[in-house]
Image (tube, helix red, strand yellow):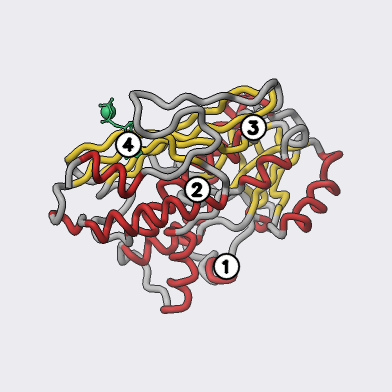
Amino acid sequence: MSEFELIRRYFTRATPSALLGVGDDAALLQVSAGHVLAVSSDMLVCGTHFFADADPYLLGHKALAVNLSDMAAMGAAPRWATLAISLPRVNEAGVDEIWLERFSAGFFALAQLYGVELVGGDTTAGPLNLSVTIMGEVPQGVALQRNGAQLGDEIWISGTLGDAALALAHLQKRIILSETEFSACALALHQPQPRIALGLALRGMANSAIDISDGLLADLGHILDASNVGAHLDFSLLPTSAHLSAHLRSPLGKQCVLAGGDDYELCFTASADRHAELLLLSEQLDLPLTCVGTIVAQRGCVVQDAQGDLIHFEKGGYEHFR
Ligand code: ADP
Ligand code: MG
């Protein structure tokens, strides 16, 4: 199959909202009046972000999901994506037409769910590598940024934390989970659900936001640095699944919650006046929103347990070049 046949077969779908989609030297896109373009790229590298034998359908989902998560964190409505994909020569490393079919199905299923159109990309031979660029729009002046946290803001987290990291720990044989525990946690690892509806609802309500991709402490740390503030977190309030809660006494369980990564939940701050509104929003979205702490003037992040004792934590979060 030629490169062009491959693109036509697996990566070309209707793009009614683009002036021009796949097939020319560039796509042509029109942003809605009064809106700005939010653009972000996230790459999944074989061996770093996933194993070579990963289910291609789930990879297609995740490659887009991690990008949608960045749109959610900005309060942007996702519109378009491009996909740069480097593929081992067909039939090497398990990549063949069935792989492409499944990858494309996983990618487009999620794209369709959020009305995202694939408008271009690049296709080369090489080690398996998936890079998506997502484009979304947000009314001028209302994007959720990392630098807006205010003293006294409450710190909120969507969903639950740590399941993906716990599933990864199982795959890496650092812990042994039961079959049921693992399959529940593996869902979080392989099929994260981007919090788009939440991001849109937080426009004008949250003062700052970030998506948790590298672990709560690392990502909240970015908000704190950008906003020149600190945080008090109450460990006993951090939202966890029943599966993870059973491991909370162990250092590994604590690490999964505070520094696990791959959660793709939103961490945001909002004025305490918004508390009741946010609880209502949680009901409307059928998504847990949990207040876990406060923004304070003293720089750094203090984590206290239910007794008020400090939980010390080695610098958390996944960093590629450390
Ligand atoms: P060029 O050589 O001008 O860069 P390409 O041959 O790389 O163009 O790509 C041809 C067309 O196919 C372009 O419109 C490009 O955006 C699109 N394309 C290439 N790879 C992909 C892909 N993996 N997914 C979606 N569109 C793609
Ligand atoms: Mg090209």
Density class for disc 3 (Cα within 10 Å; few <14, some 14-19, many ≥20) is many
Residue 36 versus residue 321 in the image, above or below: above
Crowding around mark 2 (Cα neighbors within 10 Å: few <14, some 14 to 19, many 20+) is many
Can residue 322 be seen at all in this image of the molecule?
no
Secondary element at tag 3: strand
Q: Which residue is mark 4?
A: 84
First of labels 1, 2 by sequence position: 2
Name the side, left or right, on which 45 lies relative to 94.
right
In this picture, residue 256 sits left or right of residue 152: left
Classify residue 291 as left or right of residue 30. Answer: right
Q: Which residue of the protein is positioned furthest toward the bottom in this rendering?
A: 179
The residue beneath circle 2 is 111
Q: At numbered mark 2, what does the secondary structure look like: helix, strand or loop? A: helix
Q: Which mark is residue 245?
A: 1
From the top left corner, tell me how far across and down residue 146 is, in percent. 61, 29
Q: Is mark 4 within 8 Å of ligand 1?
A: yes
**Amino acid bearing label 1:** Ser
Of badges 1 and 3, the one in the foreground is 1
Q: Amino acid at mark 2?
A: Ala
Residue 124 is labelled as none
Estimate how packed mark 4 is, as few (under 14), some (14 to 19) or many (20 or more) residues with alpha carbons within 10 Å. Answer: some
